[in-house]
């Protein structure tokens, strides 16, 4: 019997394939292959119609979060007249234009433009631009003043003069001294406009020094265009304006030397008159007991202050610190005190060190404008 069921298990004897078997296999494979090809092609067409030949849809835009603009805290005005319209301040020609809209009666300058003169507070003269009271009554004394707390307590003002005489010294003083310290500029200095702008941008209130005749003049010479007692009132004012026209943005003037000049009412009176009508203060450095500046300022209604202590007659750090301690004692006794000094390296270092310690002891360092006797403010 030739049936596979009758063959022993495990024997793989090959059975010859007949022609009828081959035809059967062929008839089954050909249609099956065709079906597979048709189905595969249909699937490919379907897929490519949805994916391969279709542009990808763009992603939905992500929501944008706007960054908050940096806030600028406006300065606190010393006086607020809300009924007045705003004003516009622009930079000098050639510089970056800055526009600040605000209250024109505001008794302080915007810190962002503190180095730019108020255009309506300048008088063009042959000696240069001079400070004047604005048509609406604003004074340079008020607009260019540094703000302070207004709190009661022991207050001191420190005025460091001679700015502009030394480039490195001026830079060191402006960068090192606390901004509460008032800086005074010498008309003999160089690059005064540059140093004025740097000082104002750093927050300092500034003064202009005026060379006045000492007793030993001209052997002791304060510098060019010194105001002398023998000059006519017109010549005195011309030299005064030469010094005042060197820079702008100052709250007042102070004497440089001048023991003889300040002792002569006939010479000193036109100076105080001119300063008062321009809305400026006068600071007496306190080095001459014969000075008549106080009484003349009272007669002329000029804002006035006088220094109590000269801190660096001796350029020794220990001596300077003792003078500053004396300044503190006067302030605690009287409520206020004023010191003057020069921009020597040792003075700048000593004042900086002492000021930081004095603040911790409750002493407030204020601009000199805060301690003037001002008839307008009563």
Image (tube, helix red, strand yellow):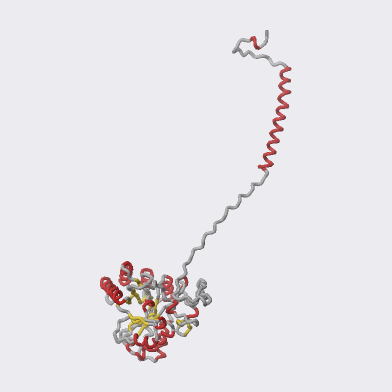
Q: Quadrant of the C terminus?
A: bottom left
Number of dots carrying numbers: 0
**Is residue 143 among what the camera can see?**
yes
Residue at 41% x, 73% y: name it: 147
Between 176 and 60, the one nearer to me in the picture: 60
In the image, taking residue 214 as reference, residue 18 lies left or right, namely: right
Residue at 57% x, 54% y: name it: 63
Position in image of residue 362 (x %, y %): 32, 69
Q: Quadrant of the N terminus?
A: top right
**Is residue 184 among what the camera can see?**
no
Residue at 60% x, 11% y: name it: 9
| Image quadrant assignment for residue 209 | bottom left
Residue at 63% x, 49% y: name it: 58
Between 168 and 199, the one nearer to me in the picture: 199
Position in image of residue 99 (x %, y %): 52, 72
Position in image of residue 281 (x %, y %): 39, 81
Which residue appears farthest toward the top when viewing the image?
Answer: 1
| Image quadrant assignment for residue 157 | bottom left
Between 173 and 285, the one nearer to me in the picture: 285
* Position above or below: 62 against 124: above
């Amino acid at each position: 019997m030739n049936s596979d069921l009758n063959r022993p298990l495990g024997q793989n004897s090959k059975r010859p394939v007949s022609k009828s078997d081959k035809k059967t296999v062929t008839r089954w494979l050909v249609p099956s292959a065709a079906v597979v090809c048709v189905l595969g092609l249909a699937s490919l067409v379907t897929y490519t119609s949805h994916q391969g030949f279709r542009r990808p849809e763009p992603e939905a835009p992500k929501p944008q979060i706007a960054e908050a603009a940096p806030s600028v805290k406006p300065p606190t005005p010393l006086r607020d007249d809300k009924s007045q319209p705003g004003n516009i301040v622009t930079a000098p020609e050639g510089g970056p234009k800055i526009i600040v809209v605000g209250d024109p009666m505001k008794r302080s300058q915007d810190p962002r433009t503190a180095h730019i003169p108020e255009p309506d507070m300048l008088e063009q003269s042959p000696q240069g631009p001079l400070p004047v009271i604005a048509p609406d009554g604003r004074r340079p004394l008020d607009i260019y003043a540094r703000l302070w707390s207004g709190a009661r307590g022991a207050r001191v003002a420190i005025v460091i003069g001679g700015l502009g005489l030394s480039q490195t010294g001026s830079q060191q003083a402006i960068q090192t001294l606390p901004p509460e310290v008032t800086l005074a500029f010498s008309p003999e200095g160089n690059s005064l406009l540059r140093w004025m702008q740097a000082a104002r941008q750093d927050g300092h209130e500034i003064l202009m020094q005026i060379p006045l005749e000492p007793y030993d003049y001209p052997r002791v010479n304060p510098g060019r265009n010194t105001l002398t007692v023998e000059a006519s009132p017109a010549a005195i004012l011309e030299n005064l304006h030469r010094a005042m026209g060197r820079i702008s943005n100052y709250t007042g003037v102070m004497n440089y030397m001048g023991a003889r000049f300040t002792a002569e009412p006939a010479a000193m009176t036109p100076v105080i008159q001119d300063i008062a009508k321009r809305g400026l203060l006068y600071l007496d450095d306190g080095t001459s007991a014969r000075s008549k500046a106080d009484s003349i300022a009272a007669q002329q209604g000029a804002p006035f202050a006088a220094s109590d202590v000269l801190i660096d007659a001796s350029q020794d750090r220990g001596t300077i610190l003792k003078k500053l301690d004396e300044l503190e004692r006067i302030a605690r006794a009287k409520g206020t005190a004023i010191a003057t000094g020069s921009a020597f390296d040792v003075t700048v270092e000593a004042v900086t060190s002492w000021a930081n310690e004095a603040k911790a002891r409750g002493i407030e360092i204020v601009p000199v404008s805060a301690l003037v006797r001002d008839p307008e403010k009563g």
